Image: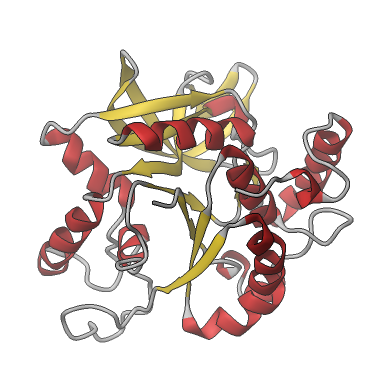
Amino acid sequence: MKTTLVILAAGIGSRFGGGIKQLEPIDGQGHIIIDYSIHDAIAAGFDKIIFIIRHDIEADFRERIGNRVEAVVAPLGVEIAYAFQEITNIPIPLPEGRAKPWGTGHAVLACGGLIDGPFAVINADDYYGTEGFKKAAVFLKTGGYGLVGYVLKNTLSDNGGVTRGICSVENGALTGITETCDIVKAPNGAAVHGIDIDVNSLVSMNFWCLPLEFMDVLKNGFPRFLTSMTNPLKDEYLLPIIVDGLLKSGTPVSVLPTGDQWFGVTYKEDKAAVVESFKKLYQQGVYQNDLYSDLKKH
């Protein structure tokens, strides 16, 4: 059984308009953030990567990322697979005027048939650090539901407000996630609309550890979501909401805390800081000059 990492890339590049070509390199080797997640996952013991993309970006994705990564990781015994999230892949007629994707739950549902055991899910354009992947790989061997939690102060942007799912945790178990918008850096650490919040809170950055049976949860829940939508043009089938439903029904979800710095390009202005952050990681010896050169065959 493979240790599988699912990478949510169907919306890659869409934040700034245009396609995947908008994702520029963030180091001197031409790598983008997704390369580092793949490296860290393989180093932690993952041996299968599933990219969730759209058919209309497939050629660009394979040219920009997929073919290059596959050539590097195949000799390491790591499998690369593709799943496709399409807005029309639903069991009802597409609501007239719907242009928005159906969300992260629908994206993972597209992996049906490719997953045969516990798996982790991450965003394509976020840097998660090395510790989260190590903890996730160990947790997946024990089974159950888990969430890698990041310290809020390690996820903020210098260039504007961010939305974070603030976790309530008791004895290492998740008891709830509160989606909180417009969190900004403040003199006391962080604030929302001028009100200070605990900068040491754990937050979700969409790094999930999930058992195989979660695929059945997604499959059974999606038709119910479609028939209960309040806004057919905008409602989304989202992993945090689905997991919250499991929590409320008594399913335990473990929180795997990490002190690693998260970063990503929430705003265009964030890119310079991201480039500088990777330079520091190289200086600290976290990565080799030839990024994938330290990985060993599984």
Determine if residue 193 is in view.
no
Residue 253 appears left or right of 276:
left
| Quarter where residue 88 is shown | bottom left
Instruction: Report the front residue among 275 and 81.
Output: 81
Total labels drawn: 0
| Quarter where residue 274 is shown | top right
Instruction: Report the front residue among 188 and 263.
Output: 263
Instruction: Report the front residue among 167 and 96.
Output: 167
Determine if residue 154 is in view.
yes
Above-or-below relation of 48 to 294: below
Q: Residue at x 89, y 55 (%)?
A: 28
User: Residue at the top extreme?
Assistant: 171
Residue 78 appears left or right of 8:
right
| Quarter where residue 112 is shown | bottom left
Q: Residue at x 17, y 79 (%)?
A: 91
Q: Residue at x 59, y 30 (%)?
A: 131
Counting from the top left corner in percent of width and height, residue 280 is at 84, 34
Counting from the top left corner in percent of width and height, residue 175 is at 25, 25
Residue 250 appears left or right of 130:
left
Counting from the top left corner in percent of width and height, residue 276 is at 84, 41
Residue 252 appears left or right of 86:
left
